Amino acid sequence: MAGFILFFAWVGFGGDLAIGMLTADNPPGSYHHWFPFIGIVTSLVAAGVCWSAWRNGAKRVLWAAGAWEIIEPATPEQRQYVNVVEEMAIAAGVPRPRIWLVPDDDPNAFATGRDPETASIAVTQGLLERLSRDELQGVVAHEMAHVRNFDTRLMTLLAGMVGAILLVSDGARVILRGGGRMGSGGRAGGGGGKKGGAGALGLVVLVLWLLTLVIAPVISRLLAMAVSRKREYLADATGAQLTRNPAALAAALEKLEGHGGATRAITKGAAHLCIVDPSERKISDVEGFLGDVFASHPPMRERIARLKGMAYSAE
Amino acid sequence: MLTLGILLAIVVVLVLWVVGAYNGLISLKNQVLNAWKQIDVQLKRRHDLIPNLVNTVKGAMNFEKGTLDAVISARAKAVSATGVKETARAEGELTQALGRLFALTEAYPDLKSNANIMALQEELTSTENKVGFARQLYNDTATQYNTRQATFPTMLVAGLAKATPAELWEIEDAAERSVPVVNL
């Protein structure tokens, strides 16, 4: 998380740093870049996007998934689901979240909201049909753990930050294409004769910063996934602590894993909120470096093994 | 001047620590009380559900009157119980009586497939779970509270916060430990 914030600071203020270094050697009277307006503008954009994600992120995720809220449970299955959520809310000591159902046959579940008071938990129809009561309880406990550990807030904010980076990066590319010629002309005039160390360093920093801008969307998504992977293990463990039944969650994960299809109702942007990766080509199956960098979820085998370890030591 | 500054700093740090420790204890104490209320809410709900259940099965199970009466009297005892220990014991008995009743409904095919019974069964299972989880939360919070007020250095302000050990909800009867197998 700290890396994430450093990265954003770099994207925002790195450009100012570079230009500041470049113009530091300029003769008095000519332009000195000291006011970090690039950083301030990007920060404002990021803050705006995050604020909107903060206010409407949860609603948007639920809307995008086509979820509808269960107010009055209509079937025994839904009744059971509502009961299980209430049980887990008691176990976690948080208020009962709003309960949603996603009309999708693939079993999956996610939680969203900025704090336990405004949290929402959603599962797919397929999940209700396939899991036993204990397994459903394990899955709901995992989601409740995300709520109680404030992961839902973190994830919503991360989604907002990734969106902001994308916006800034795209904007910067457009500006650079337009202003490229003018910038190079100015530099030739100002830097003539003076070969200050700060100027050379500034150029290196500027190049680095421009490179970062180009690959920023990729890096920010990778960072978001790294955060998400860590929180998955924690939520599994907290979920097991809530139900005192890690074996049921392990069994549920095995069922979810065994059902290979994709959860079509859930879009890519919400993938890191789900209990299992909703995409078709499950990259979370890939262990080792590739899986470590590109997956939003840790390898399923590893998660199940850890849960079974807990179940074993509890007996 | 320097020593005075250092002394002042130490006093400020100490005062801040006392305030923090005191507030922490009070907050935990309230959490314990709240967790206890959670159990209460769920127990009340269970007591409210039982008459429904008894009415539904009464017709079909005329000759199992003993079991039904056991449930009713266990419920009455549980409703009037006060204090952690007594409540725990009475509720344990009620759980057992309910377990026996559900085990008996096994023998009645028309009861087993009755939608009402199934809904009631789900409600009671859920309430039972809620009682269990509320108890778990209560015990976890109470343990945390007890540990905090008994360990150094927080114990130094325990008297100030009027902290006394909270009673844990324990299962006393060995028979209660064996979970009745309910399989409808």
Image (cartoon, coloured by chain):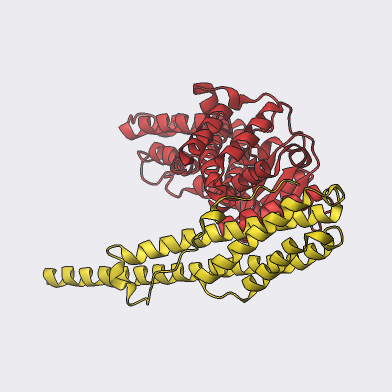
Chain colours: A red, B yellow
Q: Residue at x 53, y 71 (%)?
A: B86
Q: Residue at x 61, y 63 (%)?
A: B93
Q: Residue at x 73, y 53 (%)?
A: B102
**Percent of width and height locating residue B52:** 79, 65
Q: Residue at x 54, y 53 (%)?
A: B177
**Percent of width and height locating residue B114:** 86, 52
Residue B127 lies left or right of residue B59; in this view the side is left
**Percent of width and height locating residue A77:** 79, 47
Residue A143 lies left or right of residue A107; in this view the side is left
Q: Is residue B18 visible?
A: yes
Question: Who is closer to the viewer here, B174 or B24?
Answer: B174
**Percent of width and height locating residue A39:** 50, 46
Question: Who is closer to the viewer here, A164 or B150?
Answer: B150
Badge count: 0
Quadrant assignment, res A249: top right
- Vertical comparison of A226 with B2: above or below: above
Quadrant assignment, res B2: bottom left
